[in-house]
């Protein structure tokens, strides 16, 4: 379990970037796999999510997860959609006693809190979502709810720069959008570059004048602490687990 130093100090907030430990799953999913889209036994996933709800001090039915599609869609959670399937990659809410959760396995989980207005949010920021401005759209959603705000964010564990190999086609996609994006890449060899996803995401928040801290861990390298899609692919596993990051208002 990992925490933002800043968010940890806020009395009416519960949050956590959960590791893969302290769960019920076995094998490649050992042990706190919260990926409902994985091939893990449903019973294990339910037990894992119940554990998370307990830690966040919310009822199990009030732990809200998204069906994530690497989109730029942001949804506000209210009473009328609380029990519905949420297809999005970011959520915000004013509701107390509700936990918003994001699952990741190398992508960036971001937890947000509007200190002035008691609004929470979470973002699933893989490269596709970040590239498509999921972060900007989430901040705009906060501002639509109340323009007089003070938003603080925490960027959670994700794949580190030294672990994130990409090809030149990937690199060219970013540079085509903006030459400034060159700074997020370094050379690995003749055929590969290394991409700094964490810095790319952090700069998006910085440009939006959102203050933030880092829970800086490399999900690919820290195999005892985190699930990793890339590591699972290298090990030729047929699936992979997902870690959860969540936040709730007391």
Image: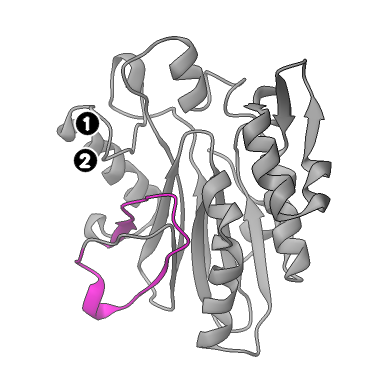
Residue at x-position 22% and y-position 59%: 61
Q: Can you tell which quarter of the image residue 190 is in?
A: top right
> Can residue 228 be seen in the rendering of this structure?
no
Q: Residues within 10 Å of mark 1 (few under 14, many from 20)?
A: some
| Picture layout, residue 183 above or below residue 192 | below
Residue 85 is situated, as x and y percent measured from the top left of the image, at 22, 61
Answer with left or right where residue 242 lies relative to residue 183. left
Badge 1 marks a residue whose secondary structure is helix
Mark 2 residue element: helix
Tell me the CA gap for discs 2 and 1. Answer: 5 Å
143 left or right of 23 in image = right
- Viewed as shown, does residue 181 lie left or right of 36? right
Q: Position of residue 62 (x, y in %)?
A: 28, 62
Quarter in which the C terminus is drawn: bottom left
- Write down the region rendered in magenta: 62-84
Is residue 65 highlighted in magenta?
yes
What residue is shown at x 18% (from left), y 28% (from top)?
41
Look at mark 1 in the image and give the residue it sits on: 44
Q: Is disc 2 in contact with disc 1, using a CB cutoff of under 8 Å? A: yes
Q: Assess whether residue 115 is covered by the magenta stretch.
A: no
Q: Which residue is mark 2?
A: 46
In front: 184, or 205?
Answer: 184
Residue at image position (16%, 33%) is 43
Q: Answer left or right for 45 relative to 68.
A: left
* Residue positioned 27% across, 38% down in the render: 37
Outermost residue toward the top? 235
Above/below status of 108 relative to 204 = above
Residue 154 lies in quadrant: bottom right
- Give the image location of residue 49, x and y in percent: 29, 44
């Amino acid at each position: 379990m990992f925490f933002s130093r800043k968010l940890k100090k806020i009395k009416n907030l519960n949050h956590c970037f959960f590791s893969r430990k302290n769960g019920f799953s076995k094998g490649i999913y050992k042990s706190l796999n919260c990926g409902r889209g994985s091939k893990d036994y449903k019973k294990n996933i339910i037990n894992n999510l119940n554990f998370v709800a307990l830690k966040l001090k919310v009822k199990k039915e009030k732990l809200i997860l998204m069906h994530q599609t690497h989109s730029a869609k942001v949804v506000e959670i209210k009473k009328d959609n609380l029990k519905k399937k949420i297809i999005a990659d970011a959520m915000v809410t004013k509701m107390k006693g509700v936990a918003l959760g994001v699952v990741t396995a190398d992508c960036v989980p971001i937890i947000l809190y509007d200190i002035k207005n008691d609004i929470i949010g979470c973002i699933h920021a893989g490269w596709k979502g970040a590239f498509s401005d999921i972060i900007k759209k989430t901040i705009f959603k906060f501002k639509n709810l109340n323009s007089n705000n003070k938003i603080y964010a925490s960027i959670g564990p994700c794949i580190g720069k030294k672990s994130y190999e990409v090809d030149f086609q990937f690199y060219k996609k970013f540079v085509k959008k903006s030459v400034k994006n060159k700074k997020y890449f370094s050379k690995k060899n003749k055929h590969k570059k290394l991409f700094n996803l964490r810095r790319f995401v952090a700069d998006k928040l910085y440009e939006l004048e959102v203050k933030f801290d880092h829970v800086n861990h490399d999900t690919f390298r820290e195999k005892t602490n985190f699930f990793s899609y890339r590591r699972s692919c290298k090990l030729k596993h047929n699936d992979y687990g997902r870690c959860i990051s969540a936040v709730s208002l007391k």
